[in-house]
Amino acid sequence: MNIERKDIRGVTMTLTGGRLLLPNANIAEIITFAEPEPVPGAPAWILGRLRWRGWRLPLISFAKLAGFATQEGEMGAKVAVLRALGQTPRLPYFCLLTQGFPRLTTVASDALIPADEGELPPGALMRVLLRDEYSYIPDLLDIERRLVEELQLAA
C-alpha cells in the first residue's frame, strides 16, 4: 500500500512570549508596523485599526489575548495581514502583530506533534511541537468571532 505524505506550507511567527504556526494560505501580506488608529472601548488585545489597500483592518495582539504579555514591543515589529475564514463581509481580513519576520516552513504531517499540557490560552486551537519548538495554532474562527463581538460593542 502506498501512503501519500501530505506536507503543508506553514509560517511560524514569533510573538511576545510565544510562537504561532499558521498555514501560509492564511497570510495575505506581511507589512511594516505602523501606529494604529485607536478603537475606543476595545479590549487591550485589539491594538487599533491599520489602513491597508483601502481597508481599515483591526490589528490584534495574540500575546495579549492569550495572556502571554501585557506589553508589546514595537521595535522591529511586523504585521501579518490574515485572510478571515468567517463569512463576515465587513471583516475579510484582520492583522496580527508579530515580532520580526515570519518564517516559511514545510510542515510534514508526521513532524507535527500535539503537545497536551493543560488548558489552552484564549484564541488557541492547539499547542504543537515542530522541530523541537513549541508553537500555538491559533483558532482563527474564534478570534474572528471575538473581533466581531468587540468591534460591534466598541462601534
Image (spheres, helix red, strand yellow):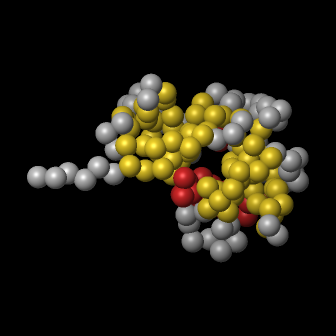
Determine whether 13 is above or below 85 in the image: above
In the picture as drawn, the residue positioned furthest to the bottom comes out as 89
Callout count: 0
Which residue is at the front of the view, 132 or 83? 132
Residue displayed at 75% across by 56% down: 58
In the picture as drawn, the residue positioned furthest to the top comes out as 132
Residue displayed at 83% across by 32% down: 75
Percent of width and height locating residue 15: 66, 34
In-image side of 56 versus 62 (left or right): right
Residue 6 shows up from this direction: yes
Residue displayed at 68% across by 30% down: 16
Percent of width and height locating residue 70: 74, 30
Residue displayed at 44% across by 29% down: 131
Quadrant of image for the C terminus = bottom right
Percent of width and height locating residue 51: 84, 60
Determine whether 8 is above or below 132 in the image: below
Which residue is at the front of the view, 125 or 41? 125
In the picture as drawn, the residue positioned furthest to the front comes out as 2
Which residue is at the front of the view, 95 or 88? 95
Determine whether 132 is above or below 2 in the image: above
In-image side of 50 versus 45 (left or right): right
In-image side of 107 versus 101 (left or right): left
Residue 124 shows up from this direction: no
Percent of width and height locating residue 5: 29, 49
In the picture as drawn, the residue positioned furthest to the left comes out as 1
